[in-house]
Amino acid sequence: MGNILQDLRYGFRMLRKTPGFTLVAVVTLGLGLGANSAIFSVVNAVLLRPLPLGEPERLVVVWEKKQTQDSAVAYPNYLDWREGSRAFAQLAAYRRDSFNLTGAGEPERVAGRHVTGNFFATLGVRPVAGRDFTAADAQPNSAPAAILSQGFWQRRFGGDASVINRQLTLNDKSYTVVGIAPADVAFGYEADVYVPIELSVAVVPFYKERGSHPGLWVTGRLAPGATVEGARAELDAIMARLAAEYPETNAGRSVHVESLYENTVGEVRPALLILFGAVGFVLLIACANVVNLLLARSVERRREIAIRLALGAGRWRIVRQLLTESLLLSFVGGALGLLLALWGTDLLVAAAPADVPRLAEARVDLRVFAFTLCTAVLVGLVFGLVPAMGAARDDFNEFMKESAGGAEGGRVRLHGALVAAEVALALVLLIGAGLMVNSLWQLGQVDPGIEPDNVLALQVSLAGERASAERVRDFLTRVEQNVESLPGVRSAAFTNGLPFGSAGEQGFRIEGRPPIRAGEQRPKAVRYTTTHGYADALGVELRKGRFLSEQDGTNSTPVVVIDEALARKYFPGEDPVGRRLQPGAPDNPWFEIVGVVEHVKHYGLAGEAPVEPQYYFSLAQATEAQMPLYAGGLTLLVRTTHGEPQTLASAVRGQILAVDSGLPIFGVRAMKELVAESIAARRFSMLLLIVFALLALLLALVGVYGVMAYSVTRRTREIGIRMALGAQTRDVLRLILGRGLLLVLAGTGAGLVAAFALTRVLASLLYGVSATDPLTFAALSLLVVLVALLACYLPARRAAKVDPLVALRYE
């Protein structure tokens, strides 16, 4: 113990004696460790930390599949699964929804879920206050009950416990608050209010239809000993039986079962692991730099070490002392890294897209602290061991000879190898970042099918008595007229579906075509139900015929406008205008096609796989039964004549409230923000890769400069002799730059090979560019060579100015 304390004291003294070296090494390590710790805090929160539910490894999610396409679950099918399955201890269903909260202060639109009574029991959680739903709450004639989320309870009611048993008005219907759900049970979809789905089943017809899939999803808890594969096989057997009993609705349908954990984080895992690997490259470059610094410093300390060896110090004693100093550097660098991680984690959380699950839980906790500590120890041992072993192997007599001759020995080769490795790693990161930049630029050239500039979107929801067809039509007409009368407004329109947002898919039949046989895929399209000004407000171009008009009302012929993707797929080589199609159920009316518009990138700029056709129906022609469904989620689109559309938000809100002052207005944003959000995850990954790549390049350039400067210092006598014998400045420049170029080219070649192999993991994040794009590889390789040569030029220029007399006198 005494020897260790002695090593520590001596190590501190040595580091204090060389403040420049210590500062550079600590900052280099701090940057590398801080970046790694910040990314690890996100990886820990999103991927490593278990879901905050009871035995989360037994939880799965289930949905239906039609051939290769995912589908929500029909409620009757869910009931049959629950009745016939033995692989599940519990099966619960839920449906996302929203509610108008009124009668408790300012009206507000709150996110909600319709859930079966066993939803919280299936997740293995209990309310933090009040009680769970009971069987009585699911009875059709029971008093409606609601459970609030913990976050909403704190935000809206300040955590007041007296809210239990209080009445809450949701969609003009009174609910009794019976409990407060624990935090973190939303798994990917924040919900403020939970209500029993059974109450909706009793009054909403489509729940009872086996052919209807109203956004219903299922989560289950596996029985003890059951597996995901076994549960999938059992449910597939049940679906096969249902297909035989109900071929019109269930033929060709199967199920998809996967763990809740995989469903929650599966989409973001590849990007996070890529970023974690990228930041690991930064740490490797930082370590290579510190190794080079320690190697250079060990040369300066050879006299000290030789004397200690001559006085009887053992070689292990020398190694231990040098490793102690390396560990001191790594610990101080780790402390700096933790400080940077605290700031960096907050920055990552603020800058990341909102749809990254569990990101809000990211913080520098004990696990992140342990990761940083272990990484610092490992880094200290790794980067300290090579110079320590090299110094301990030095021979005293050989040192005396080298002091006279100035030979560089094998350290030069190690310096060069480390510099080449740094260049290679930096090039890999730069090429990855370059591919992401190229991909994002390609996405920016994609025509979204709309003109999002100067468009403001506001959401409103009409529920309860407000959702009657007559009142909705009156509301739509008055609001559109009022808003269009505002200065600076060109047009306004309502829609229940929005590109880059939400819209339902619906199957249809084409008149005159043979009926779909059992098991065949029914044609379907994304359905927009809008008012007549929609195309003008959103900038959707008309290709043929006309768009919806004011004359398309309840007493006129039902009409529909299709997009060019639907026209190409189902009417190839013919004019679809004048043809008829029937959306939804066989008893629905036939709609005449009156126009064709351009295709809109509904699912994002990166495209749709497969591309879903789209069609447009008139809100004015919605039936009394359909109108409440559409009115529950309306978006008002306002196209302005100039300037930022948000400047008119307050005036537009005023016109809506002038028609109905009791409506919550929410989701106010510019349409171009929605377009930007569709590529937010790619942009976030790109920005981080750029930051890491530039940091890696900076560290690599510091390493190149440091090694070349060290080489010049070591070769001062040689350069002096060369110049004394007649060497010119250009000859010295060629000598130093030649060696630097050799190292840089070696690193560039290795980096190109590594990038060719590693950038393939980026393929899922790229659009319109190959993971081995030759232009990106060539351009960034050239950039690295040129910048690295600049780092070599500065020491070379200094070498060229060496005075031969001074150099020889110095030696």
Image (tube, rainbow, N blue to C red):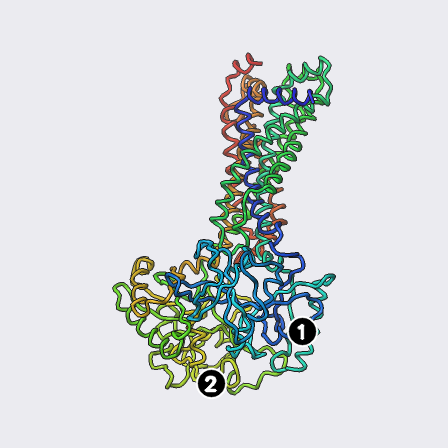
Given this view, does label 1 or label 2 mark the residue nearer the observer? 1
**Residue 597 screen position, x and y as percent:** 42, 73
Q: What numbered label is drawn on residue 781? A: none
Residue indicated by mark 2: 590
Q: Whole-percent x and y of residue 476?
A: 34, 73
Q: Position of residue 86 (x, y in %)?
A: 71, 69
- Say whether disc 1 or disc 2 marks the residue closer to the N-terminus: 1
- Side of 237 where 42 appears, left or right: left
Q: Is residue 721 visible?
A: yes
How many residues crowd mark 2 within 10 Å: few (<14), some (14–19), many (20+)? many
User: Real-space Cα distance between discs 1 and 2?
Assistant: 38 Å
The residue that label 1 is drawn on is: 83
> Where 385 sits versus 591, above or below?
above
Nearer to the camera, 297 or 784 = 297
Residue type beneath disc 1: Glu
Q: Secondary structure at mark 2?
A: loop
Q: Where, quadrant-wise, is the N terminus in this rendering?
A: top right
| Amino acid at circle 2 | Trp
Res 667 → quadrant: bottom left
